Amino acid sequence: MEDAGKIIENTCLSDEDLIQVYIEEYYKEVKKIAISYLGDYSTAEDIAQDVFIKVYDNLKSFKRKSDVFTWIYRITINHCRDYVKSAHFRKVDLTESFIMNRMVTQSDFTEEVIERINTIEKVTELPVKLKEVIILYYYNQLTTKEIAKTLRIRESTVRTRLTRARQLLETQLKIDGR
């Protein structure tokens, strides 16, 4: 993805025009990250809107030490983390929400769909540090280097967390007989 920040870096856009460019360029990706992280479409919509409000509010303080997408990505991940820590999130059954938002009918429950739902359920049960690397790696298809940059951790830490998360998922799926 070409960074919109680099494209418009030397142009004189108002903050309103700049945020509009960022929304057009990154909104779908931000929403995809939030859906992957939270498992709920409507909540992801709210998170995405909140992210761009935060981006707008912090345009002046953005120091361009990273590209714009990385900055927006960090805001998104941090906002998702905060939401997961909130009391409201703990009351929501992620699996039920995931199924309801896709309006899955009984006939749609093939073995593959059931296996995917069970895997998603197990991913949502992982500790946050493991869950976020799994989501970023498998669902958002970032490299370990990109994940390290986004989460501000070492690449070796990303690889370690991926390994631990895979082991936990494998163990949990075996216990459940899947």
Image (cartoon, grey):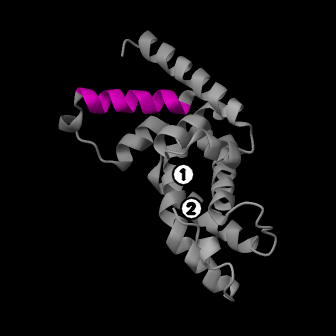
Q: Is residue 164 visible?
A: yes
The span shown in magenta is: 111-124
63 over 79 or under it: above or below: below
138 over 29 or under it: above or below: above
Residue 113 part of the magenta-drawn span: yes
As drawn, the label of residue 178 is: none
Write the residue at 42% across / 38% down: 96
As drawn, the label of residue 48 is: 2
Lower position in the chain sequence, tag 1 or tag 2: 1
x and y percent of residue 121 in the render?
Answer: 46, 30
Foreground residue among 91 and 160: 160
- Quarter occupied by residue 127: top right
Q: CA distance from mark 1 to mark 2?
A: 7 Å
x and y percent of residue 117 in the render?
Answer: 37, 32
Left or right: where 69 falls relative to 174: right
Q: The residue under label 2 is which amino acid type?
A: Ala
Write the residue at 78% across / 68% down: 62
Quarter occupied by the C terminus: top left
Q: Which residue is mark 1?
A: 34
Foreground residue among 19 and 124: 19
x and y percent of residue 118 in the render?
Answer: 40, 27
x and y percent of residue 69 in the render?
Answer: 62, 62
Q: Secondary structure at mark 1?
A: helix
Question: Disc 1 vs disc 2: Cβ atoms closer than 8 Å?
Answer: yes
Q: Secondary structure at mark 2?
A: helix
Residue 79 part of the magenta-drawn span: no
Q: Residue furthest left?
A: 107
Q: Main secondary structure of the magenta part?
A: helix
21 over 65 or under it: above or below: below
Foreground residue among 27 and 137: 137
Q: How many numbered tags mark residues here?
A: 2
